[in-house]
Image: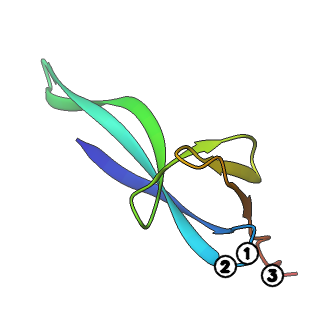
Amino acid sequence: MEDVVDTIAVRDTNGDEVTLYEYQGFVPRMTLLGLRRNAGDKRLELDTGEAVRRVNDDTFVIVSSGEPLFRIARGSLN
């Protein structure tokens, strides 16, 4: 099972804005206190369903095509 833990606004090489979804898997585990969730693997996916790999905090790559994606700078509240 997985949960969406983050969304990341990115821009492709054509300047189009798309959204990445970061999913966190989890593994249910029974303890004396009841059912608990252990964190599992994380993965990134475009809103179109394509798998994405993180290069660094601001750069990502679409796995199937090798196309880079760049994080859109977050605005400052200052």
Camera-near label (2 vs 1) is 1
Are there few (<14), some (14-19), or many (20+) residues within 10 Å of tag 1?
few
Report the amino acid beneath label 2.
Asp
Q: Position of residue 32 (x, y in %)?
A: 12, 18
Name the residue at 55% across, 43% down. Answer: 63
Q: Residue furthest right?
A: 78
The label number, if any, that marks residue 1 in the structure image: none
Camera-near label (1 vs 3) is 1
Quarter that holds the N terminus: top left
Q: How does the figure colour the protein chain or chains?
A: rainbow
The label number, if any, that marks residue 16 in the structure image: 2
Q: Residue furthest top?
A: 32
From mark 1 to mark 3, how far is it between C-alphas? Answer: 28 Å
Are there few (<14), some (14-19), or many (20+) residues within 10 Å of tag 3?
few
Are there few (<14), some (14-19), or many (20+) residues within 10 Å of tag 2?
few
Q: In the image shown, does 43 or 14 lie closer to the viewer?
A: 14
Residue pointed to by mark 1: 14
Report the amino acid beneath label 1.
Asn
Name the residue at 52% across, 46% down. Answer: 64
Task: Return the disc, 3 or 2, that comes first in the chain's sequence.
Answer: 2
The label number, if any, that marks residue 77 in the structure image: 3
Report the amino acid beneath label 3.
Leu
Name the residue at 76% across, 72% down. Answer: 74
Residue 53 location, quadrant: top right
Left or right of 49 in this view: 6: right
Q: Are marks 2 and 1 in contact (CB under 8 Å)?
A: yes
